[in-house]
């Protein structure tokens, strides 16, 4: 496995034990890959993490996913073995294949409604996290989004911050959570053309 280090071009395929455990090809700062980590951890499903440098990908990644994207989940117990891609499809598969601690509602109508909300909120939540991590306030140079006093954006975002704080207490989130400053530092290095994928590796 990659032991938290992101593997790049020229890196050999990691020596993963032949133990039948799922293999997740991931990137530590990718929100779509984070979805899959959260579901695996919430359902306490054993898995191996193999982190990929998406700027300079190892050649063997295309054997796992011809699109060269993450997340990609290799189901080693099945003939082939098959590799699933697309975070929402992976998460739905995991919820159905591992029924303990169900995450989707079992009622078909409620399940479809939740899936629709996930699709609709994807872009909205991305904007929310961008706003809530301090970068947008820093760009505006004001104490509030509305300026020197609260405005509509402040009031619309604030209820979500309460939910965000509650989510930080969830065991799966706690195991994978990173401070906004860390995420911002990764984005800064990427914007400079030298993305530091191993920012969280102590000896990087």
Image (cartoon, helix red, strand yellow):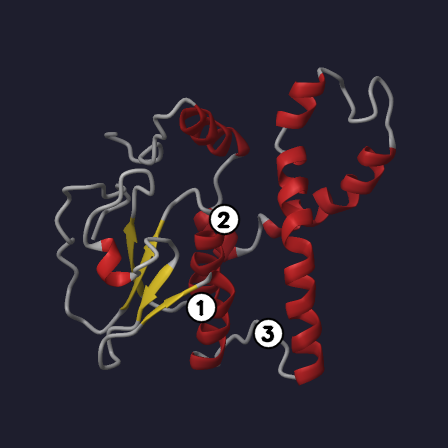
SS for callout 1: helix
Which of label 1 and label 3 is nearer to you? 1
Residue highlighted by disc 2? 31
Q: Quadrant of the C terminus?
A: top left
Task: Report the disc number at residue 104.
Answer: 3
Instruction: Check disc 1 and report the residue beneath it.
Output: 90
- Left or right position of 202 against 136: left
Please give the count of numbered marks on the rendered protein: 3
Q: Which labelled disc corresponds to residue 165?
A: none
Give me the residue at 69% from left, 48% from top: 124
Mark 3 or mark 2: name the one nearer the start of the chain.
2
Q: Residues within 10 Å of mark 2 (few under 14, many from 20)?
A: few
Residue located 41% across and 67% down the image? 44
Marks 1/3: CA–CA distance: 13 Å
Mark earlier in primary sequence (2, 1): 2
Could you tell me which residue is drawn at 23 percent across and 30 percent down? 203
Residue 74 vs residue 169, the one in the foreground: 74
């Amino acid at each position: 496995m990659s032991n938290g280090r992101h593997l790049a071009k020229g890196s050999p395929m990691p020596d993963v034990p032949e133990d039948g455990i799922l293999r997740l090809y991931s990137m530590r700062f990718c929100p779509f890959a984070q979805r899959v980590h959260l579901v695996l951890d919430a359902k306490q499903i054993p898995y191996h993490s193999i982190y990929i440098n998406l700027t300079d990908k190892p050649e063997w990644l295309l054997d796992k996913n011809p699109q060269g994207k993450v997340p990609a989940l290799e189901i080693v117990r099945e003939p082939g073995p098959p590799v699933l891609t697309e975070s929402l499809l992976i998460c739905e598969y995991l919820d159905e294949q591992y029924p303990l601690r169900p995450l989707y509602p079992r009622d078909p109508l409620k399940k479809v409604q939740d899936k629709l909300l996930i699709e609709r909120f994807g872009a909205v939540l991305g904007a929310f996290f961008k706003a809530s991590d301090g970068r947008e306030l820093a760009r505006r140079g004001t104490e509030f989004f509305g300026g020197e006093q609260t405005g509509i954006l402040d009031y619309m975002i604030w209820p979500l911050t309460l939910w965000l704080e509650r989510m930080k207490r969830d065991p799966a989130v706690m195991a994978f959570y990173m401070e906004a400053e860390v995420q911002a530092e990764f984005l800064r290095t990427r914007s400079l053309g030298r993305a530091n994928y191993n920012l969280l590796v102590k000896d990087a």
